Amino acid sequence: MRTTTRAALALVAVLALAGCGSPSAVSPSAASGKVGGTVTVFAAASLTGVFTDLGHRLEHEHPGLSVRFDFAGSSALATQLTQGAPADVFASADQQQMDIVTRAGLQKSAPVVFASNVLEIAVPPSNPGHVTGLADFAKPDLTLAVCARQVPCGAAAQKVFAAAHVTAEPDTEEQDVKAALTKVQLGEVDAALVYATDVQAAGDRVQGIEFPEAQDAVNSYPICVLKAAPNAEAAQAFVDLVRSPAGRRALTAAGFRTP
């Protein structure tokens, strides 16, 4: 078991350093100077912190540009897109939800994997349930949270439970990973299965417990510009920034793995 105390300031420092004079720190689309208006990014809830910071960076590079985010479970976002919701960019927490969008022919550019993530157990700082590993999710006397099966963190949870031969007994299934983490932070559950990046972002508000079966369910994160993007130039600029050296450094600082 380990206590997660990594500071969010690390991400701020990385973004600040990335902006200091190096040509490689500027997103490829920045040089055009033609990006403005509003760009809408539909992104998995686990990307909230790092994408918000990257959005601020892009706005700084392009005065007059406004980056708007809709963060939610990837399955909910994919459903909204297939039902006609307007957006410029889609970033999913797994390939399955991106496939729903591409099968509907909604992508302008081919999706590209820009990061990956693994699950981790989150418990309150005092660990009142004395949770030590994945096997504890089979204990009926504990109050436990996971993500709903249809969202990427829930699908990954089912994979790790199968790998560990654990019959889980969750008390609640949340619609996105942030909701599951909030249950831990509020002390409403003894443990939740969330992403390692969410444990890191929570700092000392939760304690993180790694487990070996997490490697059996590594989630890849693809991103694409959407065919009906109202602001295709700004959409491409955001995707370029995410995939740039500065974007990769920000993702790594937030705990994501990058290609």
Image (tube, rainbow, N blue to C red):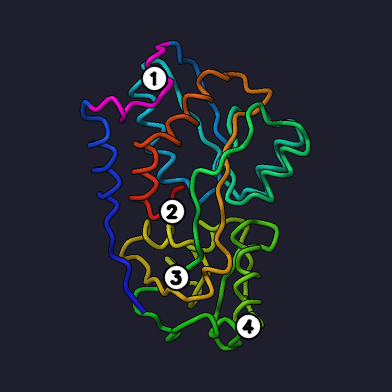
Closer to the chain start, of discs 2 and 1, is 1
Q: Which mark is residue 257?
A: 2
Closer to the chain start, of discs 4 and 1, is 1
What type is the residue that disc 1 sits on? Ala
Q: Quadrant of residue 225?
A: top right
* Discs 4/2, front: 2
Q: Is residue 201 left or right of residue 178?
A: left
Q: Residue at x 26, y 30 (%)?
A: 19
Number of other residues with Cα within 10 Å of mark 4, as a class: few under 14, some 14 to 19, many 20 or more: some
Q: Are marks 3 and 4 in contact (CB under 8 Å)?
A: no
Element carrying mark 4: loop
* Discs 1/3, front: 1
Q: Nearer the viewer, residue 232 or 136?
A: 232
Q: Quadrant of the N terminus?
A: bottom left
Q: Which mark is residue 152?
A: none
Number of other residues with Cα within 10 Å of mark 1, as a class: few under 14, some 14 to 19, many 20 or more: some
* Discs 4/1, front: 1
Q: Residue at x 38, y 55 (%)?
A: 255
Number of other residues with Cα within 10 Å of mark 3, as a class: few under 14, some 14 to 19, many 20 or more: many
Closer to the chain start, of discs 3 and 4, is 3
Q: Is residue 21 above or below residue 212?
A: above
Magenta part of the chain: 22-33
Q: Does residue 69 show up magenta in the picture?
A: no
Q: Which mark is residue 166?
A: 4
Q: Main secondary structure of the magenta part?
A: helix
Horizontal and vertical percent position of residue 47: 48, 47
Residue where numbered disc 3 is placed: 122
Q: Which mark is residue 30?
A: 1
Q: Are marks 4 and 2 in contact (CB under 8 Å)?
A: no
What type is the residue that disc 4 sits on? Val
Horizontal and vertical percent position of residue 161: 62, 76
